[in-house]
């Protein structure tokens, strides 16, 4: 499948079979994502969406096939991968002793942002977390924790952004703000790969969908993907 | 200098700085809280060690059957002291295997999620992880060494400080050596293969031991001299001093090798290792073996066809239990223990005595409780399963109890029969023995039921919480209240082992039957509740 029209291929999976050890969940899948594309991975529960994301990230080995990022096999240990791929996983762990602001500082300084203080404050403002900036993770609600994870993904520069159901636990207003921002990011050339169950996200900030259904992957236009989610 | 090295040098950020800063800003009350948490854990560890050392002395006392007559079987060829070099080899294999399971280089979930994706040099992260792994290896091996020395000095009945010092240094250094070897194997991604090989090494050691047993049985002179030489040198300074020097050289070399290889350890390996370390720590702190002894999904996968025919004819709840037993390999521990007991009794001097028989029953009681609880737990503690099976919770509990009683009867009968065949116990009062086995099995079933009802806990929140020590004490007290009544139901068996001719007093029967009745709660229902008032 080819979802992108532009020439620069950011992510490519060939004959990819995903699963745990030798237990096959789904595949073979072919996926090609070009720079500036926004691809929504959709499918029913248990269809293998999160497993696909974990395989793309290198957290799981493919049962068969290859995944390449910028023409090289995916390797989460490589510097290029860590520099250019931003990831938000479903439920991340937190440092119990670090505040919300310090978690964002960790990512910003880790990515060598010169104006990290300003970036932290902008993200806190965007996600309306200023009031809780000095609180510890244990003092946050689950929605606030989710906002911190998203802020940490968005604070850093990235060529490819991988998000796993980012809409979960967000109120409608923040969700809309997030969609607007993702659309702007995609417009500026960032590639998005998003696992989602929200048709609105597909319509608003993505241009393609990749449907995992009956162990196969099918490329769809985002509108068709949104309609599949609404069926 | 390539672009990667340049960028890594430019970005000198060490994420540990933020954690250090967080530690520095703690106020007095938070520091005191932290200190008191550490203090309580250290105190608990010291108390636990004191109990452990006493238990070891008790174990030696029982195994050697001090003050009671022992039976000399025709297959006895060696003493406990002569077997001690084998224990050294087995303990080294076990330590290496443990550290291969633990990684040993790993990071916790927070570090895995926040540190590993950063485009910074992983050297500081790896460095800290390797240092803590080496320290853990040193402490673990030293701990094993202390236990081994206690056993040895207990057996010999003498204490030599200089030998103890050199031996302890050797154990500590061997811990560093084994951990750094585990780091090297981790860097090559060879842990699963190495673990399989170590398993085979244990089997090979047992085979060699069996071969030596045969050679000693037929009195081959060189075999006798090998065994005598090895056993007599285990507490000699002339053996431990060169060993310490050799181990020092080897541990320095292996540590350097591990350090050189460590950058090859990938983020995925460190993440998985961190998860294993969290499970192991949680299990150790709560004396909960479930995290460590649960069968792996890979081994269950290998046995996926086992028991198909047998289980297809059984009612659904029984089918679940039988398949869990067979495919999870949950009977291995019991069988392995029974075989080990028989081998010890048959071949080791003085072990064939009533005191050690009592000890074997006691350990079997604890083993069966944990073993059976692991098998029946889904029927007991997962209400959603009850819903799916369309059976009431009480009905599933009854099946679980029947299964537990059946399993315990088989295990206890095997142990009793084996000990009787070897002449350690006399089955003159056959019916009394039968009744005692049934009462003990009911007690084991009741304890398994209680143990299985312990719910899964969130280790992270428990270990990180300020009240973790109190919670853990409560958990341990619950565990004791489950196990002590089970041991009480073994009282008739203990009485028959120690004094087969005098029989069992009615008060003893009364107490044990009372505790054993707890297993019949699902059958008695309201009547039992009424009895309890």
Image (tube, coloured by chain):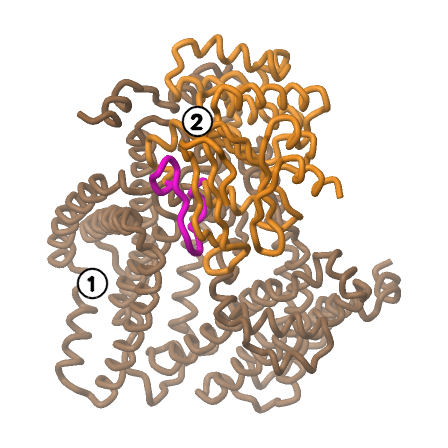
Chain colours: A orange, B brown
Residue B266, quarter of the rendered image:
top left
Residues at discs 1 and 2 in contact (Cβ within 8 Å) = no
> Which percent across, then down, holds residue B37?
51, 31
Residue picked out by circle 1? B234
Residue at the image point whose x is 40% and y is 28% from the top:
A84
> Which percent across, then down, holds residue B530?
88, 62
Residue picked out by circle 2? A159
Q: What whole-number distance in Å separates the C-alpha atoms at marks 1 and 2?
A: 63 Å
> Which percent across, then down, holds residue B339?
43, 78
- Quick check: B33 left or right of B140? right
Task: Identify the image quadrant of the N terminus of chain B.
Answer: top left
Name the one closer to the observer, A26 or B61.
A26
- Quick check: B137 left or right of A151? left
Q: Name the chain letter of the residue that bears numbered label 1.
A: B
* Mark closer to the observer (1, 2): 2
Residue B522, quarter of the rendered image:
bottom right
Q: Name the chain letter of the residue that bears numbered label 2.
A: A
Name the one closer to the observer, B159 or B464.
B464
Residue at the image point whose x is 20% and y is 63% from the top:
B234
Residue at the image point whose x is 46% and y is 57% from the top:
A21
Relative to B161, does residue B91 appear above or below in the rendering? below
Label 2: which secondary element: loop
Residue at the image point whose x is 36% and y is 87% from the top:
B73
Q: Is residue B36 visible?
A: no
A29 in magenta? no
Relative to B17, does residue B41 appear above or below in the rendering? below
- Quick check: B446 left or right of B368? right
What span is in magenta? A57-74
Name the one closer to the observer, B200 or B422.
B200
Name the one closer to the observer, B128 or B163.
B128
Relative to B486, does residue A42 appear above or below in the rendering? above
A65 in magenta? yes
């Amino acid at each position: 499948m080819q979802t992108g029209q532009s020439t620069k291929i950011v992510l490519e999976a060939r004959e990819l079979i995903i699963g745990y050890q030798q237990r096959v969940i789904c595949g073979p899948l072919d996926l090609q994502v070009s720079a500036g594309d926004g691809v929504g991975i959709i499918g029913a529960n248990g269809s293998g969406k999160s497993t696909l994301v974990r395989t793309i990230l290198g957290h799981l080995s493919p049962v068969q096939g290859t995944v390449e990022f910028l023409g090289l096999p995916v390797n989460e240990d490589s510097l290029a991968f860590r520099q250019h791929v931003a990831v938000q996983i479903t439920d991340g762990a937190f440092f119990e002793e670090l505040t919300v602001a310090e978690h964002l500082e960790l990512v910003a300084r880790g990515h060598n942002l010169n104006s990290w203080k300003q970036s932290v404050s902008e993200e806190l403002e965007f996600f309306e977390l200023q009031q809780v900036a000095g609180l510890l993770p244990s003092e946050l609600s689950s929605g606030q924790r989710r906002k911190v994870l998203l802020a940490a993904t968005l604070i850093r520069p990235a060529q490819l952004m991988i998000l796993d159901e980012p809409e979960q636990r967000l109120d409608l207003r923040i969700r809309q703000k997030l969609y607007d921002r993702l659309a702007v990011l995609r417009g500026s050339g960032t590639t998005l790969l998003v696992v989602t169950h929200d048709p609105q996200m597909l319509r608003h900030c993505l241009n393609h969908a990749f449907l995992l259904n009956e162990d196969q992957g099918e490329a769809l236009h985002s509108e068709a993907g949104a309609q599949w989610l609404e069926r | 200098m390539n672009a990667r090295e340049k960028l890594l040098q430019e970005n000198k950020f060490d994420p540990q700085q933020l954690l250090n800063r967080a530690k520095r800003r703690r106020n007095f009350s938070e520091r005191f809280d932290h200190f008191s948490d550490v203090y309580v854990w250290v105190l608990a560890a010291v108390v636990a060690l004191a109990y452990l050392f006493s238990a070891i002395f008790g174990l030696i006392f029982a195994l050697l059957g001090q003050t009671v007559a022992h039976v000399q079987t025709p297959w006895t060829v060696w003493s406990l002291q002569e077997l001690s070099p084998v224990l050294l080899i087995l303990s080294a294999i076990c330590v290496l295997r443990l550290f291969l399971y633990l990684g040993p280089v790993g990071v916790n979930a927070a570090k895995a999620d926040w540190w590993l994706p950063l485009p910074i040099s992983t050297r500081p992260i790896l460095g800290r992880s390797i240092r803590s792994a080496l320290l853990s290896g040193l402490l673990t091996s030293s701990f094993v060494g202390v236990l081994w020395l206690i056993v040895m000095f207990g057996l010999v009945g003498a204490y030599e400080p200089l030998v103890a010092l050199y031996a302890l240094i050797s154990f500590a250094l061997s811990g560093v050596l084994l951990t750094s070897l585990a780091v090297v194997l981790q860097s090559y991604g060879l842990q699963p293969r190495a673990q399989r090989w170590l398993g085979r090494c244990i089997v090979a050691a047992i085979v060699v031991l069996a071969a030596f047993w045969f050679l000693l049985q037929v009195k081959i002179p060189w075999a006798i001299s090998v065994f005598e030489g090895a056993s007599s040198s285990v507490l000699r300074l002339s053996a431990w001093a060169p060993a310490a020097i050799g181990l020092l050289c080897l541990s320095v070399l292996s540590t350097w090798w591990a350090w050189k290889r460590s950058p090859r350890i990938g983020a995925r390996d460190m993440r998985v290792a961190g998860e294993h370390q969290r499970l192991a720590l949680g299990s150790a702190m709560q004396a909960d073996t479930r995290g460590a002894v649960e069968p792996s999904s890979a081994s269950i996968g290998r046995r996926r066809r086992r028991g198909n025919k047998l289980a297809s004819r059984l009612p659904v709840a029984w089918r679940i239990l039988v398949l869990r037993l067979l495919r999870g390999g949950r009977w291995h521990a019991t069988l392995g223990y029974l075989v080990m007991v028989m081998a010890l009794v048959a071949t080791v001097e003085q072990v064939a005595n009533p005191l050690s028989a009592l000890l074997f029953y006691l350990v079997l009681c604890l083993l069966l409780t944990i073993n059976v609880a692991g098998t029946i737990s889904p029927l007991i503690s997962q209400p959603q399963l009850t819903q799916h099976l369309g059976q009431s919770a009480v009905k599933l509990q009854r099946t679980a109890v029947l299964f537990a009683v059946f399993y315990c009867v088989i295990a206890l009968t095997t142990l009793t029969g084996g000990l009787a065949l070897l002449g350690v116990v006399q089955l003159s009062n056959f019916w009394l023995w039968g009744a005692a086995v049934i009462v003990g099995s009911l007690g084991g079933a009741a304890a398994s039921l209680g143990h299985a009802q312990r719910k899964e806990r969130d280790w992270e929140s428990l270990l990180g919480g300020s009240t973790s020590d109190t919670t853990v004490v409560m958990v341990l007290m619950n565990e004791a209240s489950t196990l002590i009544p089970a041991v009480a139901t073994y009282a008739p068996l203990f009485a028959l082992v120690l004094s087969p001719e005098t029989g069992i007093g009615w008060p003893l029967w009364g107490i044990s039957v009372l505790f054993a009745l707890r297993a019949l709660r699902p059958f008695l229902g309201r009547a039992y509740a009424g009895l309890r008032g």
